[in-house]
Image (cartoon, rainbow, N blue to C red):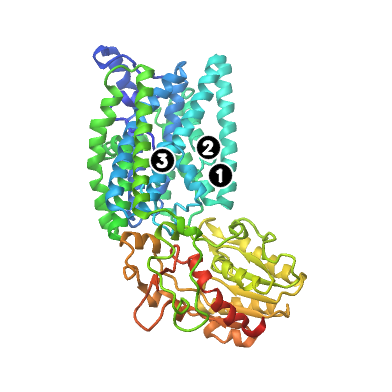
Amino acid sequence: MSTAVPPPSSATAAELLPGVVQVTRPPAATTTGDVERRRSAFRPDIEGLRGVAVLSVLAFHAGVPGLTGGYVGVDVFFVISGFLITGMLTGRPLGLWDFAARRARRILPAAATVLVATAAAGGALLDPLRGTDLARDLIASAGQFANWRFVGQQTDYLASERDPSPLQHFWSLSVENQFYLLWGVLLLGLARYLHGRRRTAAITVATLGIGGLSLALCLRWTETSAPLAYFSTGSRLWEFAAGACAALLARRVGQQAGVRVGLTVLGWAGLAAVVGPLFLYDRNTPFPGAAALLPVLGAAALLLAGTAATPLAAGRALTARPLRAAGRLSYAWYLWHWPVITIAQARYGTLSWTALAALTAASALPAWLTLRLVEQPLRHGGTAAPRRGLAVGASALVIPLIAGLTLGGGTVRALGTASAASVPAPPGAVDGPSLLAPGTVLTSLTPSLARAREDFPPGKGCEIALNADASPRCLFGDEHSPDRIVLLGDSHAGQWISAGIAMAQQRHWALEVLVKPGCPLATITVRNNVLGRTFEECDRWRENTLTRLANEAKPRLVLLAGLNRYGGPEERTQGWTRTLDRLAALGAPLAYLGDTPMPGKDIPTCLAASDGRSDACVFPRDTAFEPDPMLDGGLAARYGVRTLDLGPLLCPATGPSCPAVLEGLVLYRDTGHITDTLARVLAPRLDKGLLGAAH
């Protein structure tokens, strides 16, 4: 999963080995002595280790049974890159522009080829909404900040509900290029002002300092934000630093018999540490965090041990021809495989692991063509002057950016603008089987497909961060009124903010919003996939919120809502009982909104792929609902809770399917939340059903 370019030949490998300097003359002028020195420096075990890393990642992405921890191949590649780059930069003084030109020629052309091809395939095969996302991802990938885009989106790489981007794997290329920039400036700057032992000591101290700080951030962020820990450069630098330390130690290792025996043992231990996590880790392993130490230190041990060639060295196991062949192709293969399998699944639906494995294997063909026709000619052809390398790099950045802008412009034309954001919601019916008020007819999808995905309720700041355990003061309507409605729950409660505002405003009341995404109001301890652990903050938030309500003025209504899929039916019953005991003690009227149907697929994307046909994105009724103890188990009656179940309205009749569009209204903005437009349409129905004559 690395962005390190695999060496296609012994000469290329030697460019990055400790103490070996790239020959800048044209190939025709290379002497026999140069060739022999390069051959002697070639490390076939590193090529094989690259093969292990890339095959692990490919198998993980294809879902091959057993290799549930194949994602650690990324970490192995980061270690290799730190080892090789540090060896190159400490081999001799090297100009910064020369270094930048070498990196640009080595990495960017192949990446640009894949980006342009992915843009073309996405424009032809993906729906306009996915095309819009792809265009943005393409610009971020070409600009080498894709990892920060995914951090900003709070994308969970290991357990994302939304279909992953065909360019999500470019996060690692962005991390590596950011590392190259930092490491090049740092090491070449030290080389300019320091010499000899002072320079070596400064590099060692800097490597240990940066690595230690990065590891601390990694451990911390793995606990608080999995996307930040996984995608950010700061939490990954320690892996490069581990490889750098191995490169610095490699210069000091002797070839005495005792040292060689120790390195042999170290190498086998390192190989076990790399291979073990492939089978022992899975999607539920908190990662990177402490779990990344095993493959990272194992890879560093293998690289260090490879400096001692002994008949029993672990590195010999890595020199098998299939592993070396995969290693030579690793960079291009990694770049190609992910767009192939993600676009195929976006187009044809979820595929079996055997089909994904076949597609991954087939992606080796464009990878090989890219290696032969793009990487090698640009790397070795013509002059090696820095200005040519920089020109190649600049072109490889600009061309994909143009492709991204072109793709984005095409999707905007296909979808239209998001002007529907300013159009008021159509009037809704107060009761009865229809959503819309009598006489109201919609002539086009509302909200538009360009807007539906972004049709959020107001006050997104009310939905607090995952690591927060207390809600801020979040009021709507008449904020100074002594009377208020409290909206309480998770994001499935937050989707009703607009309806709550309408209910409060017509009475000149305030609406207080207390919501935490992914956190059940029922007293149930849950696991959060983004954090990769038990959601302790949820339990604390629930306790803090219930205590806060007990200490504040009694509200006119406490409106409860939330996702009805936490735990099993019995666990939900027990959890709601514990929470209702606390809420009943408030002495305020309680009301409960039944959960809305769960489509389980991205509805706006589905509609865009079907040209907006309202019948194209129905979903099974039997998976749309779960048993609800508040509606079906008698809890509401026991605690005097007024209830409103909108399920029969949003999934009418008794057929096997539920609609995604009803009376021209797009009901859902993603895989499970309703559009804000629908919430505003339903506001009169909620008012009558939950407050009735109370106003």
Marks 3/1: CA distance? 27 Å
Q: Which mark is residue 218?
A: 1
- Residue designated by label 2: 238
Q: Which mark is residue 424?
A: none
Check the image and report above or below for 362 versus 532.
above
Marks 2/3: CA distance? 27 Å
- Residue designated by label 3: 139
Out of 51 and 645, give the one closest to the viewer. 645
Q: Nearer the viewer, mark 3 or mark 1?
A: 3
| Quadrant of the rendering where the N terminus is positioned | top left
Kind of residue indicated by mark 1: Cys
Q: Which of the two discs, 2 and 1, labels the residue nearer the N terminus?
A: 1
Dots 2 and 1: beta carbons under 8 Å?
A: yes
**Quadrant assignment, res 452:** bottom left
Q: Residues within 10 Å of mark 1 (few under 14, many from 20)?
A: many
| Quadrant of the rendering where the C terminus is positioned | bottom right
> Seen in the image, is 349 located left or right of residue 241?
left
Q: Residue at coordinates 25% horizontally, 45% vertically from top-left?
A: 363
Assign a secondary structure to mark 1. helix
Q: Position of residue 357 (x, y in %)?
A: 27, 52
Check the image and report above or below for 140 versus 545.
above
Q: Position of residue 374 (x, y in %)?
A: 27, 31
Res. 577 in view = no
